[in-house]
Amino acid sequence: MNKNGSLRKTPLKKKRAISKLEFFIPEYEYRRLKKMKDPIETLERPVEHMTVYRNDGSSVTLTAENGRVSIVDSREKNVRHIIEADYFVSKIL
């Protein structure tokens, strides 16, 4: 922040080609992408949703995207559980 309390925008020092930018990802994600024949396919997959309704009217929503499963239970307000898809599948099979 500068003296008057507003955020200061700092431009890049020099223009860069997108191919020269560095991105940091977790090691496990790097290993997973490296094993794939075509890593760009992870960006082309649609997000998958499934909602399971219980007899009491509550529900559990599962969302699968980019190798992770998000689990939201309608009985748990503001709580989202995120786990690796491989781990999720190994537990339900």
Image: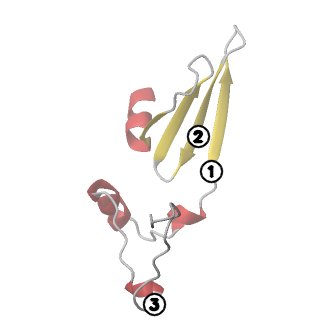
Q: Residue at x 67, y 16 (%)?
A: 58
Task: Name the mark nearer the viewer: 1 or 3.
Answer: 3
Q: Which sits earlier in the primary sequence, circle 2 or circle 3?
A: 3
Q: Decide: marks 2, 1 in contact (CB < 8 A)?
A: yes
Q: Position of residue 24 (x, y in %)?
A: 33, 66
Looking at the rendered structure, the secondary structure element under dot 3 is loop
Residue 31 badge: none
Q: Position of residue 14 (x, y in %)?
A: 41, 91
Q: Which sits earlier in the primary sequence, circle 2 or circle 1?
A: 1
Looking at the rendered structure, the secondary structure element under dot 1 is loop
Task: Indicate the amino acid at tag 1.
Answer: Val
Rendered-image quadrant of the C terminus: top left
Count neighbours of disc 1 (C-alpha within 10 A) and say few if under 14, some if 14 to 19, many if 20 or more.
Answer: few
Q: Residue at x 46, y 45 (%)?
A: 68
Which residue corresponds to mark 3?
17
Task: Indicate the amino acid at tag 3.
Answer: Ala
Which residue corresponds to mark 2?
63
